[in-house]
Amino acid sequence: MQTAVSPVWHIRSVEEMKYKKSMQLVKKMTLVIPLVFTGFLMAVSGSAQIADVGDGGNGTITFKSTGRSSTATETVISDNWKLAISPDGRRIQKADSSEWFWLGDTGWSLFQELNREDAVYYFSTRASQGFTVIQAVVVMGWSRKWNDPNAYGYHPFIDSDSNNPNEKFWEHADWLIKKAQDYGLYVALLPAWGSYWGDKASIEYAQWITNRYKDYENIIWVNGGDRKVGEDKELFNQLGRIFDTDEDALTTFHPNGGDPSSKHFHNEKWLDFNMDQSSHGKRDIRADNQVDEDLAKTPTKPTLNGEPNYEDHCVGWDKDCSKGTFNAHDVRQLAYWTVFAGATGYTYGHVHVWDFYNGGNNEDGYADWKIEVKDSGAVQMGYLVDLMMSRPHKDRAQAQFILSNESPEGLKQRAIIGSGYTFIYTSQGHNIYVNLDKIPWKQKKAWWYNPRNGIATFIDSIPDRGNHTFNPPGNSGNDNDWVLVIDDTSKDYTKPGYIRSNN
């Protein structure tokens, strides 16, 4: 039987919670992350196992890579940290052609906010939930002033001069990046927030930080930083060429909302993959349309949404949240729409976590980021990774052509097809209308995959030919999204997702 290397056990801190209101009591409970979450790390970041308890005296846990690949499936994983672009230009994979999936978290203020104890808690939690990338800014802006100190009181630069780094600050930054790697995490590194480039952050600083981290295995360079390109295109091209001197790392650009990297830099050699920001302006943004536009460009480059609607963020930035807040369904919907449009991954964000707000935020009054880091949307992002890693990635592509009606009830569904399988997402549980004759294998079997809990349910029988209507479980409406999985029977794939979800 063909299957990906699957974790036997995988911690999900709040996986049984279906609705945010029912989670309030549970979210106040103290949760101790167990030591045994190695199976999932093995599957998404390269195999990892506990090497020893302790990392030289600070009482944390260290992991080591122990290469493992599947001999029973086309899905191959490895412990190689170097990333590369797939031959078809559509995906990020490991440089040895083994498979990997980008699930990012916007931990923007990591370097200036977290001490070592809190960083271990954050990394271990996100790793146990299935995340593979932390997007972080070394010198954060937005809510912070230039040269703000870190958790130990050390400023990044002496006398606020970016050409005069303070080694005490950078020693902690080094530790954070290495500790993220211990937990199987890449760091998508923005050296400075976008507003600082060309002003307080110098070109010399860009060269210095690139040289400092060019030998780190888990770095992905991120140019920009939520800034309109405007007349500064050449400045960002200069920065991109500097980051690109790290030959073993990929480079992208974090754009301002509605101003994707592909609009300005798609043909630049230094840009390895595109990034969009759908941002937080309204619900139901069809960011998957930007994926379509990006993948239609030449040359083909991978793309992903690097800043979507944050869970618990006020819709449209209303201070009184008069339009409500983004919930777990909003998060899932945007993730599945873009990934099933062909994005190479997805970045999640939480309004209380990105700046590590202690004492909560006025959106919902919950206690602090250490509770919100376990919110339901974050947990459910792991089920997306489970699904995508349970089938081979090679030649995966959009498949709207198999839908005889792609927009039932006026809401566009998304379909993607790979080697002997297809995934179709309905965000509100509407019927899925499939032309089975357009699926290029004769014998078919099907499953319903639940994005809310990661459980797959076998559909007893389906025809092999003709048009067929699939009726998802439950009543259509918000929070009843489903994935229809149609497999090639001859592949003998296991259930979609992983063993932890299927037992």
Image (cartoon, rainbow, N blue to C red):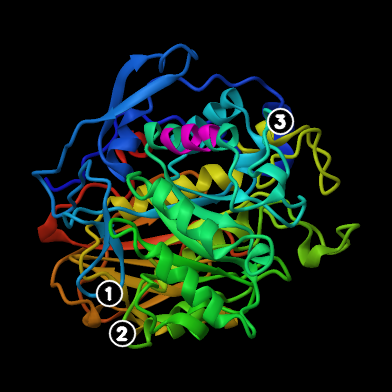
Give neighbour class at mark 2: few <14, some 14-19, many 20+ (Cα, 10 Å). few
Residue type at tag 2: Pro
Task: Give neighbour class at mark 3: few <14, some 14-19, many 20+ (Cα, 10 Å).
Answer: few
The range drawn in magenta is 171-178
Instruction: Give the structural element (helix, strand or loop) at label 1.
Output: loop
Q: Is 430 located above or below residue 165 in the figure?
A: below
In the image, residue 233 sits, relative to residue 67, either above or below, namely below
Check if residue 141 falls in the magenta segment: no
Mark 3 or mark 1, earlier in chain: 1
Q: Is residue 29 left or right of residue 188?
A: right
What is the spatial separation of the Cα atoms under label 2 and label 3, in whole angstroms? 46 Å
Q: Residue at 34% across / 71% down in the picture?
A: 416
Determine whether the residue tagged by mark 2 lies in a helix, strand or loop.
loop
Q: Residue at x 40, y 47 (%)?
A: 213
Q: Which residue is mark 3?
A: 153
- Quadrant containing the N terminus in the rendered view: top left
